[in-house]
Image (cartoon, rainbow, N blue to C red):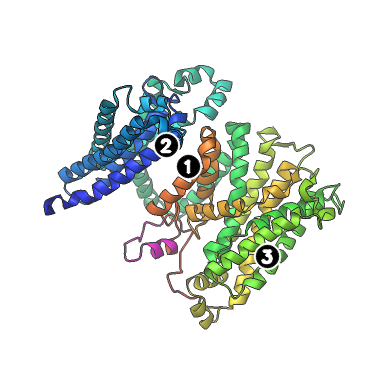
């Protein structure tokens, strides 16, 4: 028995995988995509959903430090355990099919036939067991391969799945300019076999060449003279600017709208990151600052608002930012003595108070009540259109995209400067331990109020852009869901990490918008991704070094930081040298 103890984690992981497979089938995800092609004629999305859990389990369980034979056996056992549980569920559903549909309406005879490969239920269950065990074995074998082989295989497979899933928005774009290529690449909403083969080769080649090219570039950069090394960041910045400048032209109208949504949450994430990531103040009512920015912009710029000033957006913007900062001070003042959960509950209350006030009949003469504020003018240009060099006339979502990118850049620069200033060190000390920070001379009151004011000033920019983009403001747009999503962007991106806010917004806002096929299951997938993220990588996609040290205390994480912008001088328990 002791010799077989190494299989216990594999069995446990396999049972979890089996539950995942049953859940995917029971909630209707598999049923909804039975005929959605991934590789036309060979693989559908429904079949892929059932194949991925045992494959990933085998790959993951084989990652434990052990001998290669034990790794392979563990993968096989994990896949078999998942397949056994799924097969048992399939047999129960087949035997109780009429009765079980009264509770789980998505378990149809069509779904059961698909799961059982059109065979007798017993044979279908056996086929699922064998298939899951084989997939677990395949994942484990792939994990035991050398990195130089494994990485290209994984990258090529991922590229095929990604390009296939991108068909709903990528194919119409290709049809505009590359119709023949689009018809060659896609067939019946899935990749053609030649197209999949080419995509796989390209993805694998890029992955295989990436590490050698990166090592060569680093060696050459290290051997270059100081002047050339100083030139590299400027060249990279110019390349990034050129890419962002031409992106709406390449992406088209739909993707430009997605980029605008991502940019709004980048602003919200950067602002909330100051409050939560830097200062450690859990704010669940951040939507209040977003709403203040939108409503103040509407009041000052709309000719039909209660003020009727009809100011230009750029004239009104400083007033809006100053007003939002004052609101931040107003919200921060009553919560100075609160910490942790109590602070979260109170700020949640402030967010709901703001929404109710904007919705109320008492303030309807000012904010319009349910009808909101309309006829808000565009941010720039006549009729929302203007001309840019090399681009030409810009209108629609792209007209909002360019100034929004500028706002994001300014907010990121301000946040970066704050993080590495005396104020940022004080915030970090306060986040680690308020009592110790106060004992070293940090004014807790001043720095808490400053965090709320700065977070509000950045967050209101998102509301101002939102108001001019839609040219109207309604209270229903400022629910608690906005605060929760902004907080999720901060956590998934990496608390305290400025680049992490961009990645977090792309992952939580951009990808769901692109995957409109999953609209019915959006929150389900969203929640599953958050749970998986917190289990696998709790420090975030692009973590800050201090946060990474906290979550991996005792582990060697030096040199692995992906989220530090400049030198990180704050470690756990550190206090600022000056207050």
| Disc 1 crowd, CA 10 A, few/some/many (<14, 14-19, 20+) | some
Residue 456 figure quarter: bottom right
Q: Bounds of the magenta span?
A: 547-561
Taking depth in this image into account, of 2 and 337 the one nearest to the observer is 2
Residue 395 figure quarter: top right
Q: Could you say where residue 200 lies in the image, as x and y percent from the top left?
A: 36, 29
The reply to whether dot 3 and dot 2 touch (C-beta < 8 Å) is: no
| Disc 3 crowd, CA 10 A, few/some/many (<14, 14-19, 20+) | many
Q: Could you say where residue 381 lies in the image, as x and y percent from the top left?
A: 77, 40
Mark 2–mark 1 Cα distance, whole angstroms, equals: 14 Å
Q: Secondary structure at mark 2?
A: helix
Q: Secondary structure at mark 3?
A: helix
Taking depth in this image into account, of 96 and 459 the one nearest to the observer is 96
**Residue at which label 3 appears:** 328
Among numbered discs 1 and 3, the one appearing first in the sequence: 3
Mark 3–mark 2 Cα distance, whole angstroms, equals: 46 Å
Q: Secondary structure at mark 1?
A: helix
Q: Could you say where residue 339 lies in the image, as x and y percent from the top left?
A: 54, 71
Q: Residue at x 67, y 37 (%)?
A: 397
Q: Could you say where residue 60 lies in the image, as x and y percent from the top left?
A: 29, 45
Q: What secondary structure predominates along the stretch shown in magenta?
A: loop
Q: Is residue 26 above or below residue 284?
A: above
Q: Which mark is residue 525?
A: 1
User: The C terminus appears in which quarter of the rendering?
Assistant: bottom right
**Residue at which label 2 appears:** 26
Mark 1–mark 3 Cα distance, whole angstroms, equals: 34 Å
Q: Residue at x 56, y 69 (%)?
A: 342
Residue 83 figure quarter: top left
- Judge whether residue 528 can be spotted in this image: yes
The reply to whether dot 1 and dot 3 touch (C-beta < 8 Å) is: no
Q: Is residue 518 magenta?
A: no
Taking depth in this image into account, of 522 and 147 the one nearest to the observer is 522
């Amino acid at each position: 028995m002791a010799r077989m103890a190494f299989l216990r984690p594999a069995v446990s992981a396999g049972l979890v995988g089996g539950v995942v497979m049953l859940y995917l089938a029971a909630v209707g995800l598999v049923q909804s995509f039975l005929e959605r092609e991934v590789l036309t004629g060979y693989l559908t999305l429904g079949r892929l959903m059932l194949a991925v859990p045992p494959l990933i389990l085998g790959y993951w369980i084989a990652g434990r430090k052990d001998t290669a034979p034990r790794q392979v056996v563990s993968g096989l056992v994990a896949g078999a355990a998942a397949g056994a549980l799924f097969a048992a569920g399939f047999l129960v559903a087949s035997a109780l099919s009429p009765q079980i549909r009264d509770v789980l309406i998505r378990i149809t005879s069509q779904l059961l036939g698909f799961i059982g490969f059109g065979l007798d239920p017993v044979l279908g269950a056996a086929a699922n067991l064998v298939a899951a065990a084989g997939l677990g074995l395949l994942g484990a074998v792939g994990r035991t391969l050398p990195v130089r082989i494994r990485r290209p295989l994984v990258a090529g497979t991922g590229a095929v799945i990604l390009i296939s899933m991108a068909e709903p928005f990528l194919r119409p774009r290709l049809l505009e300019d590359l119709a023949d290529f689009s018809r060659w690449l896609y067939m019946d909403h899935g990749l053609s076999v030649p197209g999949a083969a080419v995509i796989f080769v390209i993805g694998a080649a890029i992955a295989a060449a990436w590490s050698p090219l990166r090592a060569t570039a680093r060696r050459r950069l290290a051997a270059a003279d100081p002047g050339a090394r100083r030139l590299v960041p400027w060249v990279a910045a110019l390349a990034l600017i050129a890419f962002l400048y031409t992106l709406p032209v390449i992406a088209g109208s739909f993707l430009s709208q997605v980029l605008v949504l991502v940019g709004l949450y980048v602003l919200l994430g950067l602002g909330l990151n100051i409050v939560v990531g830097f200062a450690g103040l859990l704010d669940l009512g951040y939507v209040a600052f977003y709403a203040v920015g939108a409503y103040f912009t509407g009041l000052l710029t709309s000719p039909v608002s209660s003020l009727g000033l009809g100011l230009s957006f750029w004239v009104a913007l400083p007033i809006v930012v100053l007003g939002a900062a004052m609101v931040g001070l107003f919200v921060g003042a009553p919560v100075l003595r609160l910490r942790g959960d109590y602070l979260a509950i109170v700020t949640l209350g402030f967010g709901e108070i703001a929404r109710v006030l904007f919705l109320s009949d008492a303030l309807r003469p000012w904010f319009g009540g349910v009808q909101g504020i309309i006829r808000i003018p565009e941010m720039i240009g006549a009729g929302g259109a203007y001309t840019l060099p090399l681009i030409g006339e810009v209108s629609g979502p792209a007209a909002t995209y360019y100034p929004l990118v500028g706002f994001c850049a300014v907010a990121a620069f301000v946040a970066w400067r704050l993080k590495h200033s005396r104020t940022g060190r004080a915030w970090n000390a306060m986040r680690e331990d308020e009592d110790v920070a106060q004992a070293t001379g940090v004014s807790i009151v001043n720095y808490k109020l400053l965090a709320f004011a700065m977070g509000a000033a950045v967050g209101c920019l998102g509301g101002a852009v939102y108001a001019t983009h839609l040219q109207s403001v309604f209270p229903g747009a400022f629910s608690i869901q906005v605060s929760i999503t902004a907080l999720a962007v901060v956590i998934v991106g990496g608390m305290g990490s400025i680049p992490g806010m961009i990645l977090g917004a792309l992952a939580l806002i951009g990808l769901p918008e692109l995957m409109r096929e999953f609209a019915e299951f959006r929150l389900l997938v969203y929640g599953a991704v958050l749970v998986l993220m917190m289990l696998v990588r709790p420090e975030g996609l692009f973590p800050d070094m201090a946060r990474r040290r906290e979550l991996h205390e005792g582990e060697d994480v030096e040199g692995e930081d992906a989220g530090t912008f400049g030198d990180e001088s704050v470690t756990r328990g550190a206090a600022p040298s000056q207050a």
